Image (cartoon, rainbow, N blue to C red):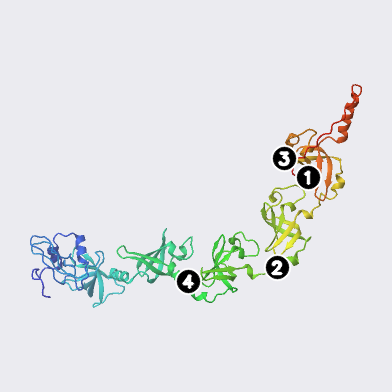
Amino acid sequence: MAVNPDPQIPDDKDISSELAAALGDISPEELMRAAVPPSGAGGVPGAGSGSAGSSDGAPHAGGHAGGPAGGAHGGGRGGGRGGGRGHGRGHGHGHHAEERVKIPGTVVGVRGADVLVDIGGKSEAFIPAEEFDTPPQVGEAHLFVSQGFDRDTGQMRLSLREARASARWDSLKVGDIVEARVTGQNIGGLELDVKGIKAFMPKSQVDVIRHETFTQFITHKLDCEVTEIDRRGKRLLLSHRRVLERKAAEQRDQVKGTLAAGQRMTGTVKRLTEFGAFVDIGGIDGLLHVSDISWARVNQPGDVLKVGEQIEVEILKIDPGRDRISLGRKQLSADPWTLAATNYHIGDTVEGRITRLMDFGAFCEVEAGLEGLIPVSEITYGRRIGHPREVLKEGDTVRVSVLLVDADKRKLSLSLKALTADPWNGVADRYTKDAVVSGAVVRTTNFGAFIQLEEGVEGLAHISELADKHVRTPEEVVKPGQVVQCRVLSVDPEQRRISLSLRTAPTARTAEAGGASSSGADAAPAEPAKSKKKRPVRGGLSF
């Protein structure tokens, strides 16, 4: 047996009795902490020197107990004879109180399910055999971590797994690239395993694109960057996104120098937005604007593209200063407007599909990428309409006549009513001057009333022609929807105008006036009629 360097402690006492004498009534929890010195001292716990406690039991000024025998920072016995708790006056730099110092030891034997380990003390420590990956052999040397003392035997209990885990924690540092296996997921992200260490990855750090679910990552191995380490809290945060971004940046640098405007490439649609699609062309994202997807009108990129789809694109522009690349897809095919003047002539009848309805007319697609406008005035002869939706709807297939083709200005004017009979043809023969006709009042204005004589043919009765007497507003005489008898004053087929009157015919007025004169001839001679001053006609139209 080795000679006891401390004559104050008898040699025949075992480690348990030494601790009891040195530590007095210290609690089991304090005993476990004492068994794991927080100091940075080297050597076997218990080695070194420490000041003895005072005989009255007061602690001596100095370091905290740090070894299985109550040593100071750096280890050392400090048990006082008076039974007080000795606090050694050791030296060395201390570790955090939660960190465990690794203890070197050598396997000296196997006792049942336990392995005996010599750690340099008076008695062996023990460790469960199950902590070894392979059956331990006598003479094997390892680093262990103390887990306190066994209450029955007083032997120190060691852990090899914790020592190895501690070594793995010590080997990690922020910025390291590690391989991690995904073991599960929770509401915040992914759970991973890095060589036995549990780690966590927030959802935002899983990928460079958004995922609705993360089940596809479970059991997969990912290259990750260590972003945060908390050894006390056993917390390890990882990021797979940073690794992907770093690789993408390296790829971009390699590809950038090989790109030029006009190149045609195959890319993968990565993301869709309202204004276009982002396409990956060899590690670099380019923007395919919605207006460059197709010559035909595209309302939403999702109508013609989908994420993950491979498409052919052409590089339109590279902006190194803003790090932007503009792409085009429609440029891979011919512009339909280049042949519009050749394929379409004034008077041609073509078939098209109504694509949009606006206040001023309807857009009609006659072929992919080639739209023409049907003005609201060219939709129908039958009636006056306020909006194209009163007659048409999007998706309708119609036959139209070409009115104008201007390829330079990319304009195509179409007419729907030109393919129907014009009711104004022969209108002068059907409505002669002074003819009395019947019609329905369709609308009134401040200057008169419009009267529909037949479908597509309307005439105007000026406010001065609505009655024999003076009227302030047309509504005093007529209402919309009212059927009236009127007299044709004039017809202008060229201007598509018909003037009407609801006043009594001049011959009838003259006959009435003549009857009144003859009845009073014997009474008095007739006075010459006074000329009536002509009043200006109100209104904004001239007929």
Instruction: Estimate the x, y position of residue 404 in percent, counting from the top left.
Output: 75, 60
Q: Is label 1 in contact with label 3 (beta carbons under 8 Å)?
A: no
Kind of residue indicated by mark 2: Thr
Q: Residues within 10 Å of mark 1 (few under 14, many from 20)?
A: few
Element assignment for label 4: helix
Kind of residue indicated by mark 4: Ala
* Structural distance between the alpha carbons of marks 4 and 3: 71 Å
Kind of residue indicated by mark 1: Ser
The reply, left or right, for residue 455 in relation to residue 337 is right
User: Which residue is found at the position 58% from the left and 64% from the top?
Assistant: 289
Sequence-wise, the earlier of marks 2 and 1 is 2
Q: Residues within 10 Å of mark 4 (few under 14, many from 20)?
A: some
Residue on which the image places disc 1: 542
Judging depth in this view, the residue of 488 and 276 nearest the camera is 488
User: Which residue is found at the position 60% from the left and 68% from the top?
Assistant: 328
Looking at the figure, which quarter contains the C terminus? top right
* Structural distance between the alpha carbons of marks 1 and 3: 14 Å
Sequence-wise, the earlier of marks 4 and 2 is 4
User: Which residue is found at the position 72% from the left and 52% from the top?
Assistant: 376
Judging depth in this view, the residue of 94 and 275 nearest the camera is 275
Sequence-wise, the earlier of marks 3 and 2 is 2
Residue on which the image places disc 3: 446
Of labels 4 and 1, the one closer to you? 1
Residue on which the image places disc 4: 248
Instruction: Estimate the x, y position of residue 400 in percent, counting from the top left.
Output: 75, 57
Instruction: Estimate the x, y position of residue 117 in percent, counting from the top left.
Output: 22, 73
In which image quadrant can residue 396 be found?
bottom right
* Structural distance between the alpha carbons of marks 2 and 1: 45 Å
In the picture as drawn, the residue positioned furthest to the top comes out as 523
Sequence-wise, the earlier of marks 4 and 3 is 4
Sequence-wise, the earlier of marks 1 and 3 is 3
Q: Is label 4 in contact with label 3 (beta carbons under 8 Å)?
A: no
